[in-house]
Image (cartoon, helix red, strand yellow):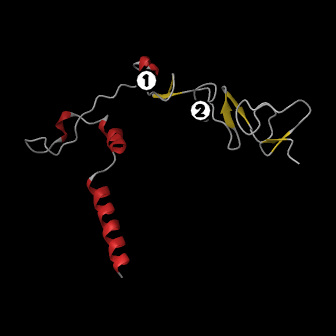
Amino acid sequence: MNSFKFLFVILLSISITIALFPSLSSQELHLEGLDASYSRGKTSFLAPKQRYVATCDKYPTVCAAKGSRGPDCCKKQCVNVLNDRSNCGKCGNKCKYSEICCQGWCVNIYVNKKHCGKCNNVCKKGSSCSYGMCNYA
């Protein structure tokens, strides 16, 4: 019975925390279109704070910064077109479900001899790639 009470208290505290502190990423999505007239009263205590968001379509050097997801800009997001499945080789080029992006090419790592199991894993001459393994069975 004590463990049930403990579990109930933990779940209750987690749900209260989630309700009181929504994620910042969901707030940032809605803040781009807001203007200063959002607050209803005279104070702006509860009004969401305006944030400056530098997107790569206006400032391409953002993608070259340390911690960026990649050096290329696709649909206002920094990506690496050499290994991004949604932008493989160029913006908007999506790889199929069974493929991954290796050096800007969509390849099936389960049967490709040059990328067997992972990118740049070449099978020896005369061997085949099956199920992502060289010389399987």
Q: Residue at x 63, y 29 (%)?
A: 88
Crowd rating for badge 1 (residues with CA inside 10 Å; few <14, some 14–19, many 20+): few
Say which amino acid is labelled 2.
Asp
Say which amino acid is labelled 1.
Lys
Is residue 72 found left or right of 7 in the rendered image? right
Q: Position of residue 128 (x, y in %)?
A: 87, 38
Q: Position of residue 131 (x, y in %)?
A: 79, 46
In the rendered image, which quarter is residue 82 located in? top right
Between tags 1 and 2, which lies in front?
1
Q: Residue at x 33, y 39 (%)?
A: 28
Crowd rating for badge 2 (residues with CA inside 10 Å; few <14, some 14–19, many 20+): many
Is residue 137 found left or right of 122 in the rendered image? right
Q: Secondary structure at mark 1?
A: loop
Q: Residue at x 86, y 31 (%)?
A: 124
Farthest-out residue, left: 42
As drawn, 62 above or below 106: above
Which residue is under mark 1?
66
Q: Nearer the viewer, residue 118 or 93?
A: 118
In the rendered image, which quarter is residue 37 located in? top left
Which residue is under mark 2?
84
In the rendered image, which quarter is residue 52 located in? top left
Q: Position of residue 85 (x, y in %)?
A: 61, 35
Q: Residue at x 32, y 62 (%)?
A: 15
